[in-house]
Amino acid sequence: MSERQAIVPAGMEAVYEKIRYAPAIKAGNTIYVSGQIGRDAAMQLVEEREAQIVQAFENLKLVLEAAGASLSDVVDVTTFHTDMRDLPLFMQVRERYLDTHPLPAWTAIGAHMLGGAAGYIIEIKAVAVLP
């Protein structure tokens, strides 16, 4: 079994220490990123819908960079949505972040509540592979 390393970017220490999960695990050349939600560095919910989706992608980007990867290394994305009617907006934002070819695999799932609290509309989980 390959060595596993917890990836905890600066500003996400509370996630690891208090909420008790790693923002990502790096195993060999594969990075498994935990679901990223639209909360800022102060662990506060970003209110506006598009801004919350952008923040979730920014958090994903931050975790990947801490693991030595980038968004172009993403091979699989799973997204959870509290309102599937947000998919067109999500897809517009996604195009700003995941525009490499081939595009990653993607699964979108409807969910009742995300991040353990009301107000979150999106959660993005990803797998990236380093060359």
Image (cartoon, rainbow, N blue to C red):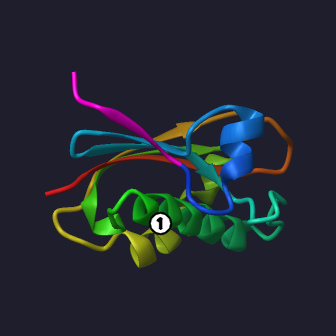
* Quarter of the picture holding the C terminus: bottom left
Which residue is more in the foreground, 100 or 23?
Answer: 23
Q: Is residue 127 above or below residue 72?
A: above
Figure check: 25 above or below 57: above
Report whether 28 appears left or right of 22.
left
Relative side of 3 to 43, left or right: left
Q: Amino acid at mark 1?
A: Lys
Please state which of residues 39 and 94 is positioned toward the viewer in this rendering.
Answer: 39
Task: Identify the image quadrant of residue 86.
Answer: bottom right
22 up-or-down from 90: above or below = above
**Would residue 21 be found to the left or right of residue 1 on screen?**
right
Residue 20 position in % (x across, y down): 68, 31
Estimate the x, y position of residue 99 in percent, counting from the top left.
31, 74
Magenta stretch in the rendered image: 1-7
Badge 1 is on which residue? 61
* Quadrant placement of the N terminus: top left
Please tell me whether mark 1 sits on a helix, a strand or a loop.
Answer: helix
Q: Is residue 113 visible?
A: no
* Residue 67, horizontal then vertical, whole percent: 39, 56
Residue at x-position 59% and y-position 51%: 36
In front here: 73 or 13? Answer: 13
Residue 70 spot, x, y in % from top left: 34, 67
Q: Residue furthest bottom?
A: 96
